[in-house]
Image (tube, grey):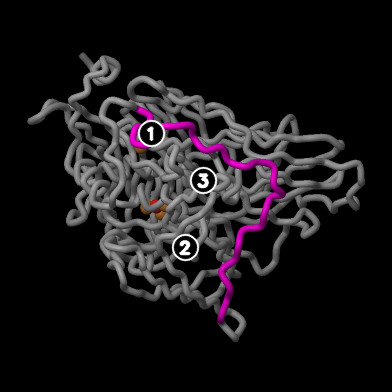
């Protein structure tokens, strides 16, 4: 029987490999529920009706991390991670982990060229953490790798300088060994925006971050631990929140054009975003603006950890709903959730907006990385094998599970390489590489090759089941860099490797 049939047969005696087992022990150590072995829903510990979340409040601005620096060109701040109690549902307390007491964490906004110094305090009881600056060109030793943990009670300074050309929409999240998935779904994630010195996008379009997170609440208001189904498929929650709110409302005058920065900060939810029937213009990807706007799109696909910048025109008065469509990205076992949801409402009023200036036809130039001088191939596989006590699951890259003490790829700073990522598994796996932005060259499926339609800086890209993607990669700074599937449960179960970039 293959693994699909095995899972569908409902056999409960499923044992998973080392890291996952440790993860489950961790849960009991942290006083959380043990995952249900036979239920896929993870709510068995707290029976009763599930809390409902209030909807329809005005969209809030993300809170900001205040800059304490007195000179221009610097950003200095303190950031603390610690447990907090929040109220997602009326009258029900939810214990979370939070940066500065909030989820999502405060928006960090800096300008290209800034010197950033953030003093981080880990006040999570009994667990180590790190802050990873997802997608940003920071030195390896400042990037919050699992090899550089900040132990419970300790402080550390993260310091880096953000070069010209790095303007874009990034995010920060923990990256400790074996606890990243939990720390993120318990609340630790925030947006990090690097503004350009000169912005080609008209200021009249505004600039609104929409930071998507995925919440699951048990009947008692707690955030339940991962179940077996979550570990295998990645955790999909019950409520997609926008800036921490369920279905907020944004009110705009008719004729408005808005710039949105979209962040998928969920553990494992694939988003396919639509703004009713409004056409979407894509202007930016993970690493900042495109060379030219891409007009006339109906939907934006955003896999976990991906970002996009878009312009949407709201011409007529009425109601526009920002939705995410259902995405089938492969699922093991029964109970694939329907992932369609309404995320936000835009109320377009009768009042007319001032006519907005047009979007420029050219946004910026994106460097040509030149011909690759080396080629590498990474293969994603999922395995199930009989071990002592039952089946063992593995999420592997080139046949191996993550080992912090092993270097998987050795590369040279400044050298352009072709990375070929082949997904030989049954689920889609979003590939992410630290330390740099790469460019998609082409994708291949069943022998059919599609060239990338435009040049864009990316740090996270979906590799659909059965698909191969080819990327141009150049690392400019030496050190150890992680690459992994950004379904955080898969990363945690081993789908991660280490690249050593030599000077
Ligand atoms: Cu967003 Cu290695 O992570
Ligand atoms: Cu990253
Ligand atoms: Cu994966």
Q: Is residue 207 left or right of residue 68?
A: right
Residue at mark 3: 213
**Quick one: label 2 or label 1, which is nearer the N terminus?**
1
In this rendering, would 188 be left or right of 125? right
The local crowd at label 3, few if under 14, some if 14 to 19, many if 20 or more residues have their Cα within 10 Å, is many
Q: Main secondary structure of the magenta part?
A: loop
Residue at 26%, 29% in the rendered image: 37
Please state the extent of the stretch shown in magenta in the rendering.
Answer: 40-68
260 or 42, which lies in front? 42
| Quadrant (top left, top right, bottom left, bottom right) of the C terminus | bottom left
Helix, strand or loop for disc 1: loop
Residue bearing the label numbered 2? 99
Q: Which residue sits at x=41%, y=71%?
A: 120
Q: Counting other residues with Cα less than 10 Å from the Cα at mark 2, is it few (<14), some (14-19), or many (20 or more)?
A: many
Residue 113 rendering spot, x and y as whole percentages: 56, 73
Question: Does the stretch in magenta take in 58?
Answer: yes
Q: Nearer the viewer, residue 171 or 241?
A: 241
Question: Where is 457 relative to 435, above or below?
Answer: above
Name the quadrant containing residue 486.
top left
Mark 2 residue's CB less than 8 Å from ligand 1: no
Image x and y of residue 122, in percent: 36, 68
């Amino acid at each position: 029987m293959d693994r699909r049939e095995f899972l569908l047969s409902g056999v409960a005696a499923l044992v998973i490999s080392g890291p996952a087992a440790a993860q489950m022990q961790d849960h009991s150590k942290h006083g959380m529920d043990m995952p249900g072995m036979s239920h896929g829903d993870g709510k068995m510990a707290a029976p009763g009706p599930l809390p409902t979340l209030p909807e329809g409040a005005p969209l809030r601005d993300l809170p900001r991390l205040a800059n304490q620096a007195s000179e221009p060109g610097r950003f200095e701040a303190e950031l603390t991670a610690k447990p907090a109690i929040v109220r997602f549902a009326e009258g029900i307390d939810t214990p979370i982990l939070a940066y500065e007491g909030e989820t999502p964490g405060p928006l960090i906004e800096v300008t290209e060229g800034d010197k950033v110094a953030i003093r981080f305090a880990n006040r999570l009881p009994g667990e180590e953490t790190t802050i990873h600056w997802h997608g940003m060109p920071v030195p390896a030793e400042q990037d919050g790798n699992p090899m550089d943990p900040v132990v419970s009670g300790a402080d550390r300074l993260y310091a880096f300088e953000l070069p010209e050309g790095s303007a874009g929409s990034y995010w920060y999240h923990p990256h400790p060994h074996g606890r990243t998935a939990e720390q993120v779904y318990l609340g630790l994630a925030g947006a990090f925006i690097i503004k350009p010195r000169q912005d080609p996008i008209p200021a009249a379009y505004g600039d609104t971050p929409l930071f998507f997170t995925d919440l699951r609440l048990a009947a008692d208001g707690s955030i339940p631990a991962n179940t077996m189904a979550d570990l295998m498929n990645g955790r999909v929650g019950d409520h997609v929140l926008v800036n921490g709110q369920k279905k907020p409302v944004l009110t705009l005058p008719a004729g408005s054009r808005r710039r949105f920065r979209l962040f998928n900060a969920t553990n494992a939810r694939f988003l396919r975003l639509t703004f009713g029937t409004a056409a979407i213009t894509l202007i930016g990807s993970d690493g900042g603006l495109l060379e030219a706007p891409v007009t006339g799109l109906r939907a934006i696909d955003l896999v976990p950890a991906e970002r996009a910048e878009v312009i949407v025109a709201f011409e007529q008065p009425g109601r526009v709903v920002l939705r995410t469509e259902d995405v089938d990205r492969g699922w093991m076992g029964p109970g694939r959730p329907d992932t369609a949801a309404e995320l936000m409402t835009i109320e377009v009023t009768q009042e007319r907006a001032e006519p907005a200036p047009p979007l420029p036809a050219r946004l910026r130039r994106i460097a040509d990385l030149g011909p690759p001088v080396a080629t590498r191939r990474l293969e994603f596989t999922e395995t199930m094998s009989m071990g002592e006590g039952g089946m063992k699951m593995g999420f592997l890259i080139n046949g191996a599970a993550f080992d912090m003490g092993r270097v998987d790829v050795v590369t040279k700073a400044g050298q352009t390489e072709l990375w070929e990522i082949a997904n030989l598994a049954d689920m889609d796996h979003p590939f992410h590489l630290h330390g740099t932005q790469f460019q998609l060259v082409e994708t291949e499926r069943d022998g059919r090759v599609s060239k990338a339609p435009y040049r864009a800086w990316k740090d996270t890209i979906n590799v659909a089941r059965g698909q191969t993607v080819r990327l141009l990669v150049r690392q400019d700074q030496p050190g150890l860099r992680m690459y992994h599937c950004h379904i955080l449960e898969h990363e945690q179960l081993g789908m991660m490797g280490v690249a050593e970039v030599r000077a």
